[in-house]
């Protein structure tokens, strides 16, 4: 059968119409994984230092970062909570680009104001001198407002390491715990789960996304995350 130009065009448009009318499928979240060295901590209280070792070792795999050395470089005193800004100065000195996302006012906390969000243990667990030293290194180049966990996860596709603060009671499903914050390193994610290095529980653990989001978003955790490029 021979068709003239007008008839051929009409036939082509008719054939394409069903495909054009079909609704577009929502894209699934592509699974993401990143290889990051793992270091264990003795307890959740040491998770910040352990995560700091993982971050530094990711960028300098041939170097060794002993706990004592890192504690000195981050002004960390054993028996106290570790806060994300304490890693910023050393990372900047090493030529990395750390960006802190948080809704915590670290300067206010260092002055002893607003500690009640962390519970009754906060007054003795927060090293205000160390936090004041760390907060002094924050500026418009390395500090951003808090953002939702899914948005932070997507930024990982471009490179780097993501360290997040989590509320222990939510993360462990144990409401009565002596202190409330701990840290995790994100090693991957998919549409319904987040994979983390948990210094207390082990490497590459899979958390349901709702649990990870709830632990990250709890007021005591402060929606705090450190993205290092």
Image (spheres, helix red, strand yellow):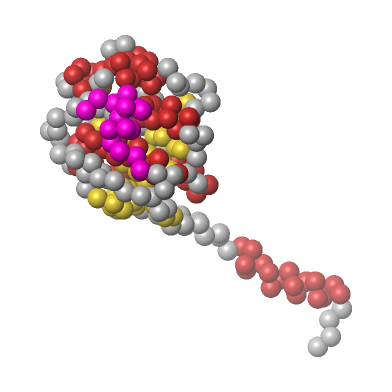
Question: At 78% from the left edge and 71% from the top edge, which residue is drawn?
Answer: 10
User: Which of the 4 image quadrants contains residue 150?
Assistant: top left
Instruction: Give above or below for 51 relative to 123.
Output: below
Which residue extends farthest right? 4
Instruction: Give above or below for 21 relative to 64.
Output: below
**Which of the image's four quarters has the N terminus?**
bottom right
Does the image show residue 20?
A: yes
User: Which of the 4 image quadrants contains residue 8?
Assistant: bottom right
Instruction: Give above or below for 36 relative to 24.
Output: above
**Residue 82 picture location, percent across and down:** 29, 29
Instruction: Give above or below for 130 relative to 35.
Output: above
**Residue 63 picture location, percent across and down:** 40, 44
Number of marks in picture:
0
Q: 85 or 194: which is nearer to us?
A: 85
**Residue 83 picture location, percent across and down:** 32, 27
User: Which of the 4 image quadrants contains residue 138?
Assistant: top left
Question: At 55% from the left edge and 60% from the top edge, which residue is drawn?
Answer: 23
Does the image show residue 146?
A: no
Horizontal arrangement in the rendering, residue 142 relative to residue 53 (left or right):
right
**Residue 187 picture location, percent across and down:** 38, 50
In the rendered image, residue 161 lying in the magenta stretch gets the answer no
Residue bounds of the magenta highlight: 64-78
Q: 91 or 170: which is nearer to us?
A: 91
Which residue extends farthest bottom? 1
Question: At 18% from the left edge and 19% from the top edge, which residue is drawn?
Answer: 124
Question: At 61% from the left edge and 62% from the top edge, which residue is drawn?
Answer: 21
């Amino acid at each position: 059968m021979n068709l003239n130009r007008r008839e051929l065009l009409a036939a082509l448009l008719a054939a394409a119409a069903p495909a054009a009318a079909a609704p577009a499928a929502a894209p699934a979240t592509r699974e993401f994984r990143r290889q990051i060295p793992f270091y264990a901590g003795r307890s959740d209280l040491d998770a910040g230092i352990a995560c700091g070792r993982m971050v530094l070792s990711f960028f300098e795999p041939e170097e060794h970062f002993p706990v004592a050395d890192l504690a000195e470089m981050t002004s960390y005193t054993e028996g106290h909570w570790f806060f994300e800004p304490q890693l910023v100065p050393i990372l900047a000195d090493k030529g990395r680009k750390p960006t802190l996302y948080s809704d915590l006012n670290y300067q206010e906390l260092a002055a002893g104001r607003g500690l009640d969000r962390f519970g009754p243990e906060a007054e003795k667990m927060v090293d205000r001198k160390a936090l004041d030293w760390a907060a002094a290194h924050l500026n418009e180049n390395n500090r951003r407002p808090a953002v939702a966990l899914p948005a932070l996860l997507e930024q990982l596709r471009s490179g780097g390491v993501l360290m997040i603060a989590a509320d222990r009671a939510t993360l462990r499903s144990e409401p009565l715990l002596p202190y409330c914050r701990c840290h995790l390193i994100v090693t991957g994610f998919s549409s319904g789960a987040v994979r983390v290095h948990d210094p207390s529980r082990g490497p590459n653990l899979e958390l349901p996304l709702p649990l990870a989001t709830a632990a990250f978003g709890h007021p005591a955790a402060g929606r705090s995350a450190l993205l290092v490029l």
